Image (cartoon, helix red, strand yellow):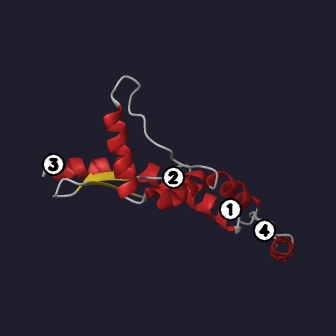
């Protein structure tokens, strides 16, 4: 039972920071989609007037800023270490190309710019072939 208690305790330690991060990511995503949260207003009439004003004057600058940066980003190759041979760099580039990351990378860049983070995973199949996933 001690092992289960340790796992539960570790999950509890991680849950709160992940929950806070998720709220921040959701808020950033709402801004990117052009649906920012309304301010907390007590007056219902004022809330309605603010919502109408926001709808009429909607300009989604967040999307323009993020998209203009992300479309200019790209990966041209890998440099694992200045002292190592270029063979490892070439191998990493082949894995990138084989995983078709040139076409998928824009999504990763966009996610990182909106949410402040994006996760890429590198794995090796049973046949020994490595791949990258977003």
> What residue would you read off at disc 4?
42
At horizontal 74% and vertical 66% (from top left) the residue drawn is 38
Q: Residues within 10 Å of mark 4 (few under 14, many from 20)?
A: few
Q: Earlier in the sequence, mark 1 or mark 4?
A: 1
CA distance separating discs 4 and 2: 27 Å
Q: Is residue 101 left or right of residue 55?
A: left
Q: Nearer the viewer, residue 63 or 57?
A: 63
x and y percentages locating residue 26 in the rendered image? 57, 62
> What residue would you read off at disc 1?
31
Element at badge 4?
Answer: loop
> What residue would you read off at disc 3?
3
At horizontal 51% and vertical 50% (from top left) the residue drawn is 117
CA distance separating discs 3 and 1: 42 Å
Q: Nearer the viewer, residue 4 or 79?
A: 79
Q: Which mark is residue 20?
A: none
Q: Earlier in the sequence, mark 2 or mark 3?
A: 3
CA distance separating discs 3 and 4: 49 Å
Q: Residues within 10 Å of mark 3 (few under 14, many from 20)?
A: few
Q: Earlier in the sequence, mark 1 or mark 2?
A: 2
Q: Which mark is residue 21?
A: 2
Q: Earlier in the sequence, mark 3 or mark 1?
A: 3
Q: In the picture, which quadrant includes the C terminus?
A: bottom left
User: Closer to us: mark 3 or mark 1?
Assistant: 1
117 to 103, vertically: above or below: above
Q: Nearer the viewer, residue 121 or 42?
A: 121
Q: Is residue 82 left or right of residue 115?
A: left
């Amino acid at each position: 039972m001690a092992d289960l208690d340790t796992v539960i305790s570790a999950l509890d330690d991680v849950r709160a920071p992940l929950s806070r991060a998720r709220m921040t990511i959701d808020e950033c995503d709402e801004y990117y989609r052009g649906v920012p949260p309304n301010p907390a207003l007590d007056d219902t009439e004022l809330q309605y007037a603010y919502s109408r004003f926001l709808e009429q004057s909607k300009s989604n600058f967040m999307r323009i800023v993020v998209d203009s940066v992300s479309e200019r980003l790209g990966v041209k190759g890998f440099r694992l270490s200045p002292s190592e041979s270029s063979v490892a760099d070439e191998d990493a580039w082949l894995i990138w190309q084989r995983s078709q990351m040139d076409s998928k990378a824009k999504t990763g860049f966009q996610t990182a710019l909106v949410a402040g983070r994006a996760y890429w995973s590198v794995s090796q199949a049973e046949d020994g072939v490595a791949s990258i996933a977003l």
